[in-house]
Image (cartoon, helix red, strand yellow):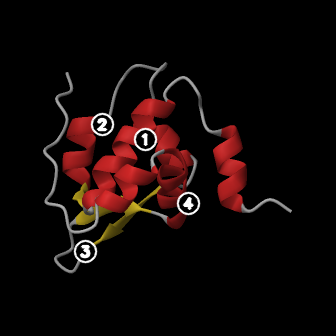
Amino acid sequence: MDSPTDIRLSYAPMENRALVLDLLGWLAVEPRPYAAVMRAWRTSCPRLPVWEDALDLGFVHRQPDAGGRVVVSLTDAGRGFLEAARPDESSASAGRPAAPAPDRP
């Protein structure tokens, strides 16, 4: 029987796979405020729903932090997807300073 991560890996959207991996790599450094994630990754283009795909596939999770603001972090499935696709990036992220938000229109 396949694990949920295996199933997600096999059905991940191929059109924006690289962008979803970029989002996951950015979040692997540290959890990010929801507002920052939306500024950087939300799009109105129906062909590139990066945030929506990551959320629908269960790769990211939203939750309030101790101060009550909503933060976004990787789920185990998201970390597994990133590690399977980019093992060097995911293992190198531990202890690394936060990366700046990508330039996005």
Q: Which residue is mark 2?
A: 41
Q: Position of residue 67 (x, y in %)?
A: 16, 77
Give the spatial CA distance, label 3 vs label 2.
20 Å
Circle nearer the N terminus (1, 3): 1
Amino acid identity at mark 2: Trp
- Please rate how many residues cluster around mark 1, counting C-alpha atoms within 10 Å: few if below 14, some from 14 to 19, many from 20: many
Of the numbered discs in the image, which one, if any, rests on residue 29? none
Circle nearer the N terminus (4, 3): 3
Circle nearer the N terminus (1, 4): 1
Q: Position of residue 20 (x, y in %)?
A: 44, 38
- Above or below: residue 53 compared with residue 67: above
Circle nearer the N terminus (2, 1): 1
Amino acid identity at mark 4: Ala
Q: Which residue is mark 4?
A: 77
Q: Which residue is mark 3?
A: 65
- Please rate how many residues cluster around mark 3, counting C-alpha atoms within 10 Å: few if below 14, some from 14 to 19, many from 20: few
Q: Are marks 1 and 4 in contact (CB under 8 Å)?
A: no
Q: How many numbered circles does the render carry? A: 4
Give the spatial CA distance, label 1 vs label 4.
12 Å
Q: Which residue is mark 1?
A: 21
